[in-house]
Amino acid sequence: MRISNPTAKFGEDKTCDYLKKLGFKIIERNFRKGYGEIDIIATHKDTLVFIEVKTRTSNQFGSPLEAITYWKLRTLIHTAQYYKLTHRNLPESLRIDAVSVILNGNEVQSINLTKNISGF
């Protein structure tokens, strides 16, 4: 799927590079099912990981992770459950992570991984 927001696409590209360095294996990007989208789907060790990426150019309106509301998290969980049901050959252990990316122009100022944001 094509991402129309260039800032979001840049943040997701940088996140994939970052996750690969941490040992994640990227399976799919921008998986969409009618009610939701998952930015990155990966495996890490023996866990299937669904990753929400939030990219910002400043903290003026709060941190990137503050943009993950209860409703967004609920949609992520439902979409992750659907993905797992339709891809049975993947690890049984699941979690939802979030990555916050702060940009300064075309440079990554900070990138942080928060694991298991749902307790899923």
Image (cartoon, grey):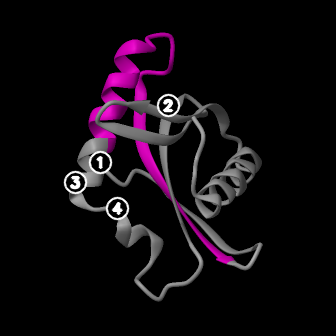
The quarter of the image holding the N terminus is top right
The residue labelled by disc 2 is 48
- Look at the image and tell me whether residue 120 can be seen: no
Q: Residue furthest bottom?
A: 60
Q: Earlier in the sequence, mark 3 or mark 1?
A: 3
Give the spatial CA distance, label 4 vs label 1: 14 Å
CB-based contact (under 8 Å), mark 3 and mark 1: no
Q: Amino acid at mark 1?
A: Gly
Q: Amino acid at mark 3?
A: Trp
The residue labelled by disc 1 is 119
Q: Which one is in front in this view, the residue at disc 3 or the one at disc 1? A: 3
Give me the residue at 29% from left, 51% from top.
73
Q: Is residue 98 above or below residue 94?
A: below
The residue labelled by disc 3 is 71
- Look at the image and tell me whether residue 80 can be seen: yes
Q: Which one is in front in this view, the residue at disc 4 or the one at disc 2? A: 4
Give the spatial CA distance, label 2 vs label 1: 14 Å
Give the spatial CA distance, label 4 vs label 2: 20 Å
Give the spatial CA distance, label 4 vs label 3: 8 Å
**Circle 4 residues within 10 Å: few <14, some 14–19, many ≥20:** some
Give me the residue at 36% from left, 32% from top.
80
Q: Amino acid at mark 2?
A: Leu
Q: Amino acid at mark 4?
A: Ile
The residue labelled by disc 4 is 68
- Nearest to the observer: residue 77 or residue 39: 39
Q: Position of residue 58 (x, y in %)?
A: 56, 83
